[in-house]
Image: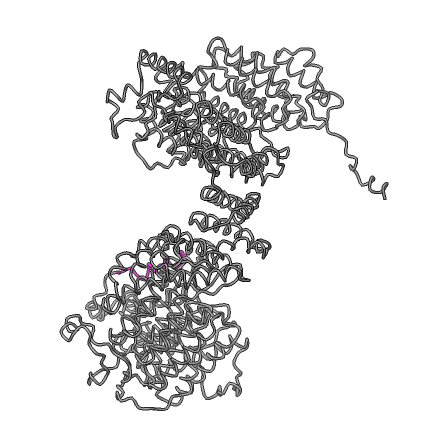
Amino acid sequence: LRPRTLEPVLVVLRWFGWLERQQRACHGGGADDARMGHDGVQMIPDAIREFQKQQQDQKENTEAKNWESVHSLLTWLGIISLVPFDLNTIDSSLEEQYHPQQCTGGGDDETNRATTTLVQSILATSLSHLKDYGATRETAAACLASLLSRPDLEHSELEGFVNWSAHIFYWFRTGKMWDENGDKSDGTDQSSTPLLIPMPNEPPSIFLVMGVLQTLAAIFKTGHRSNLLSTQQKLRGIEVLWEQSILVADGPAVGGSMILRKLLVKLFARVGCAYLPPRVATWRYQRGKRSLVENLQKGSDSESITAEDVPKAKCDTTNDESVPLNDHLFPIPDEVEDTMDQLLRSLTDSATIVRWSAAKGIGRLTERLPAICADDVLDAILQICSDAEQDKAWHGACLALAELARRGLLLPERLGVVVPIVVQAIGYDVRRGQHSVGTHVRDAACYTCWAFARAYAPSVLRPHVKELSEALVLASLFDREVNCRRASSAAFQESVGRQGADNFKHGIAILTTADYYSLGNRSDSFLNLALDIAKFEEYQTPIIRHLADVKLLHWDIEIRVLASKSLSRVSKLNPCYSATVVLPKLLDQCFHDDLVVRHGSLLGVAETVLAFGEANLVQQSEVLNDETKSLIAELVPTIEQARLYRGRGGEIMRSAACRMIECISIARVPLSVKQQVRLLDSVDACLVHPNEEIQMSAGLALNALLTYYFPVSSKGPSSRLQSRVVDKYISIVQTQDNPAATRGFSLALGYLPAKLLAPSSQVLDTVLGCLCDAAKRESLVGGEGDAETRRNAVISLVNVCKTVGINKNTMTIAEAETSPIFHLSRNQTDVVFNSLLESMKDYNMDRRGDVGSWSRIAAMDGLEALTNLSIEASTIFPHSSGRGASSSDPSTEAIIAPSFQTRLDFLDATAKVQHSLSQKKDEKCGNLFFHERLCSSILSALLKQLGEKLDVVRCKAGECLERILTSDTPRLPFVPYRHILVQALGLNERGKNWADPALTFPLLMKAVNIDDFTEPILSGIVVSVGGLTESVSKGSSASLFEWIRGLRTAKATPKIFRMGEVFLGLFHQYKRNGRILLPLLSTLDKLLSHGYLDELLCVQNGTFLTNLMSCLASEANGCGDVKRLLAIVGVSLNLLQPHLETVSIMQKEVLPFVMTMLLNPYPRVRRYTAEQLYVKLAEDGDMLFDEHECLEEANQLLLSAVWHEEHDPHGQLSDSRNRIADLLDIPLTSEQRNVKIGKRGGSRSLPKDEFESYSSLVNNA
């Protein structure tokens, strides 16, 4: 501990006589030793020596490391300052002045030695910590305040501290010390106020000023008013301090510190209260006793009482003399007016803690004022709310009103003025650019309502219940922030509980519906809770009005969308009000200059029309008249004519217009043919927009428009309609070079109704062919691949299948003649399945990454949907079973693993069905749209995707597998080893996070033992093991290694051979494809490093090794990917395993290839090859080669040659490479020996740049 920290400890020990006892022990003791025993302080006999030891050991440490000790000791000193008797009676230092010989053993030079008293020691210690940065400053301020608030110190030390504080404020404010001759401009004379506490040696910091303010605030809080203002000199000192505090608060130095501003506000409030006598205002409102039993005895609706009903009421403070309770006017000091002015100004401070402290200070100060003055304070607070743009002022005013209400200072007759302002504050939301402010204001307004509910009797608040209840309910349902919704609900709950259910109608039912947890979901609050509460007539119209007037005009687009959907649901409860009041206003606002108003109004009109259509009210003239219907029908064309799509925000207006067209179509608003075609043109214009959200909205609008309008006959659509829609869309997808157009119209083909998609089998074939071509991996748009077009084509393929359906061949000839729709045939279904399976192989990439994953995800959803349709349409195998059938059920087992005879019967039945279909189309017979090979292909594709490196792909694959393998309606047939697969993937337990690699890969590797799925699973997991994502690579590698170790333990060598075949197959299948080969090489490198491929390297005299080296050499030949070449070198060198019996074959296959890589055209590859070869020879060279001298020379050549030289004109690198091959006895052909860097066909041949130097610029100048 530091010396100044140890000093108060020694002082405290001296109080109990420990120092004197130690001194007497050093001089032989005395008779006083027995007298010290009764003090009972022998708990720590070595305390002094222990503290001295700590002081010596921690001399170099800073206070930041031992602030806990300082905090505890200062708290100890503060507690000692509270002893109820004179401190001089326990100050042992005073005894040294009277008995110096007993303490020191004599000596004239020590007789007059100056001693430090206990008060001085505590004062000095506390003052030294007032400038600390942390919690010790607050503790020092509390300790100093408890010391200076003692009655025996207020006449001396307190006055000196007040003067010293004024000097500190002056120095901090002006940057110079107080004039020694007196500063007349500040209204004080230095000679009349002597400074007892020395000033610091350096200018006071902001932390010292904070400590002084904390001390003064605590003194004025706990000190007695009679002692603080007892003499004229004290009063003058406080006035000087007050003036300096005001000047500091008005100065620029406090602007950056909200804590300093808060402490100043706290000091203002405390000093202002000190100038006023403590009193209980007779004019304040009191609801009554808070005893529930007494309130029930007096009646549920007791009248308010005042202070006259309590004749012996006492002051609610610990200060001195009581004041008469009569409410007479008395002089108000000027300091009180200055205090109130500072507090009112602080209500608009930028910091919340300052505003909150000011509100509490106003409440304390108003309690001591006469009624007329308190009314002026209320007027001043309300005046703050006059500016609607000042959100901080509104927040401070709400807090101040809450404090006044809690203390009974807001009289009932003023509620008529206050409640409208509070209601306005509950909905306060001021737009600032792209956001808004007001969350804190709304939260504070809810707190004010909570205070009203607790402060006033039901009879007092009853006239204002309607306003408050509506505002609180609307805020709890529709506020954007969850904390405001819950705060409003809490205030409403308090109001219902305090004011009674008679005042707040349906209060219990509303609280039960909109509780704390249900209000946490914003969408649920808008769409479900609002509908439930709107069923009460008292809140029905306010909810509709609030949604239409406020929330539809909100700055957040999500709130506007939710408000429109909520308005659609609530409007059904009161359609007349919505049609006569809300809808005309929204129609006018659709052409407003403000984009937010325009967009929200258009959405509101669309959803309101949809609500009327769902309720079959559009055709009723008493709800919607003809003029309104005409305005609705012409709304979108009028918006287009006004060019409201242009400029900033045109995208959201297009999306809203598409939603408007969709709602008009669903509601069956009467449209002429011209209007229908005009809306169709609008939709087509939105389909070519590059924004995906607009294209999606246009697709939905197109589906609704063509479904409910444009009727077709039994012979199908007219040629004009067919060419206008289907032919046009197909032509654009096939021929257009604009990617936005192909994306939009390929998506639109999936939204067409069945009457246009399949009027004939030829049209359906054309649509399917167009989409299948667009979904191909190699499809191009404008000469480049477009991932969005391929994805939209896959989505549309699935939508077409869902819309048209699969032909079960169960219709009669008469039904077929009257039906204009042709369903999917067996061949068409196979075409779609094949296209989706091909899309599962889409791994195209661009600068955005693996954009092919979009098509794979869409294809997985499509395979699931089309599988279910195919199974339901097939009629010749049992595709469904009872729910919950166990795996041991014989019928279930027959479906899972049919016998050979059953399969023969199945094939025979299939042949008969096909023959019957070809002969008698009108006869009902069995149909087969799903077969065993297709099932295996689908499951293999999904399992491969389950092992992919992308989390979103794994998640989608896992969810699809979980649904199709566990669903009983329909039940997936032909699943090989269903029970094993379901158990391996853990599909019996729902709700898995398939995106978690630590969970997915261990489950996936349990299913790899099924022969049918070994290849796809290994093909997928290879990409994850060799990927760059650490979590995915770590999880997949651990699962793969664990599986191989299990195979080794079980001696399942054929499975390991199968894994090798899969790896070699990937080389052949994905030749020159870096996306697959680079992870594959990384996986092989990991497996070789851990020795997991030893069985493969030894099999059949190195067959796998030979084939693998052939693949590596073929891939390295002409490869321009440096990363892939480096991986090939690493794998090839890892193949050299000297402990295996096929090491000779390894040398024969690997080393010549490595020698060729030493002369690779890329310098980085050459250097890396030389480094890795040197490391390999240093580690295993003794086991690979017998001649150590040759080995050493080869290593020296690898180190000495500069392999990363760009050019080798003299053939030095070639000579070094040939010499290394000769030393290691590596055979090279004559062609390989004569290879020169830069001469090979596969080497880089960079064209000369005509602008290689600045000379070209000079010549052309």
| Residue 1172: quarter of image | top right
769 relative to 1210 in the view: left or right: left
* Residue found 58% across the figure and 26% down from its top: 1124
Q: Which residues are magenta?
A: 44-58
Residue situated in front as seen by the camera: 621 or 98? 621
Q: Main secondary structure of the magenta part?
A: helix
In the displayed structure, 32 sits above or below 730; it is below
Task: Tell me how the rendering is colored.
Answer: one colour
Give the percent coordinates (x, y) of residue 250. Answer: 50, 77
- Rendered view: 778 above or below 288: above
In reply to whether residue 541 is colored magenta, the answer given is no
The answer, for residue 107, to whether it is visible in the render is no
Q: How many marks?
A: 0
Give left or right: position of 595 versus 1202.
left
The vertical placement of 891 against 397, above or below, is: above
Residue situated furthest left in the rendering? 297
Asked whether residue 1059 appears in the rendered view, the answer is yes
Q: Quadrant of the N terminus?
A: bottom left
Task: Compare residues 537 and 897 and report the one nearer the observer.
Answer: 537
Left or right of 167: which side holds 577?
left
* Quarter of the image with the C terminus in it: top right
Residue 936's image quarter?
top left
Considering depth in this image, is 143 or 654 the residue closer to the camera? 654
Task: Looking at the picture, tell me which residue is in the foreground, 641 or 1004.
Answer: 641
Q: Tell me where residue 913 appears, x and y as whole percent.
A: 37, 17
Above or below for 796 versus 333:
above
